[in-house]
Amino acid sequence: MPESPLLTLPGAVRAGEPDAGVAAHYGEPVREQRRLTSGEALVDLSSRGVLRLTGEDRLDWLDSLTSQRVRDLRPGDSAESLLLDPAGRVEHAMAVVDDGAATWLVVEAASAAPLAAFLDRMRFMKRVVVEDVTADVAVVGALSEPHLPGPEGPSLVWRDPWATGAEGGVTRAATADHPGEAFPLRLALVPRAALPGLPGPFAGVDALEALRIAAWRPRAALEVDARTLPHELDWLRSAVHLAKGCYRGQETVAKVHNLGRPPRRLVQLDLDGSAGVLPVPGAPVLSGEDEVGTVTSSARHHEDGPIALAVVKRSLPEDAVLTVHADGEAVSAAQRTVVPAGAGPAVAVPRLPRLGAVQRR
């Protein structure tokens, strides 16, 4: 992935993985976060991958493979969809937007090549062409409507359904006022050659990450591991249509939603800021001396201070006192429940009496 030309802006500090190639910040992280929140700033996300699907069958075909209903997308419509493995675990997440002639997928940088290869293998006799156009098309983020030049005319904009929830989805979050409502993410597709001429001002990816964590919004590059089920991250809110037709992993999605509970759950951690350090993704979450989960993302929020997302055991009490280790320091952490420990099942199944059991009156 080529480095962004916006890294030459004054004060730019390079981001690490999974955002290598763009700026973590431009020297004023708190101010950048406030500008982004108010809708004034853009975020250089040109490290993300972009795939382009063309051909008459593209929407029906993509609908048959992934978790969201996308076959009825009209020009300008957006969706989020997941590619699951046969056991219902998350393999790839994609932001989907159609322009009437092509369907565009925005994915994590590490997903672009393997997802393109998988989709190309699954074309069979379908009239679909899969192209990785990351070298020519870049992604720019905002929390307001961006008006930028696009790859083929005005910019094509993906509007994140997390803020409102998607039709056909369901949220398990235990709050009426979901923090995602304050995170109206927009992703604009622009020619990579146009990046140096964009108007700004710019905020770094650290600012976007802090706001994403506070919105409980999962990200494939950080919250997903080899065992992740979408239910654990409340991803049925935006990326899964529970009434659509068959797709790979659908049986597990329906079974866990209707009859079971996911083995893990997402929480937000409010961290003690006195140590001045943040846990890195992968840091263990401890209850006493027992390891009960893993930190997936962390950031300094301009209002809430140091925060993190973590995936913990479903059985962990919601009032448990937790600690995480950051740069050799033990940091205390308070939970904010995202997916409740008792969430599910959606269908009440009556328990049948055991054969031969004595009925007492």
Image (cartoon, rainbow, N blue to C red):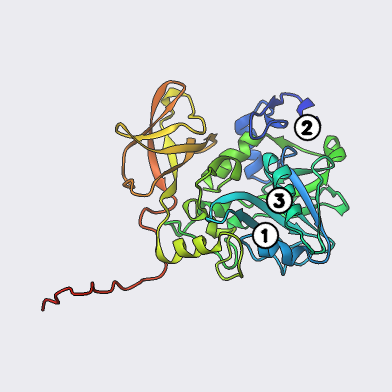
Which marked residue is nearer to the observer: mark 1 or mark 3?
3
**Left or right placement of residue 310 versus residue 191 in this view:** left
- What is the residue that sits farthest to the left in this orientation? 361
Of the 4 image quadrants, the one containing the C terminus is bottom left
On the image, the x and y values in percent for residue 5 come to 81, 30
What residue sits right under mark 1 in the picture?
Answer: 79
Classed neighbour count for the residue bearing mark 3: other residues with Cα under 10 Å, few (<14), some (14–19), many (≥20) = few
On the image, the x and y values in percent for residue 145 come to 73, 52
Residue drawn 56% across the image and 40% down it: 222
Q: Are marks 2 and 1 in contact (CB under 8 Å)?
A: no
Can residue 170 be seen here? The reply is: no
Q: Tell me which label, 2 or 1, sits earlier in the chain.
A: 2
**How many numbered marks are there?**
3
Which marked residue is nearer to the observer: mark 2 or mark 3?
3
Residue drawn 66% across the image and 61% down it: 65
Q: Tell me which label, 2 or 3, sits earlier in the chain.
A: 2
- What is the residue that sits farthest to the bottom in this orientation? 361
Can residue 303 be seen here? The reply is: yes
The amino acid pointed to by label 2 is: Ser
Give the Cα distance between marks 2 and 3.
Answer: 27 Å
On the image, the x and y values in percent for residue 97 come to 74, 57
Frontmost residue, 100 versus 250: 250
The amino acid pointed to by label 3 is: Phe
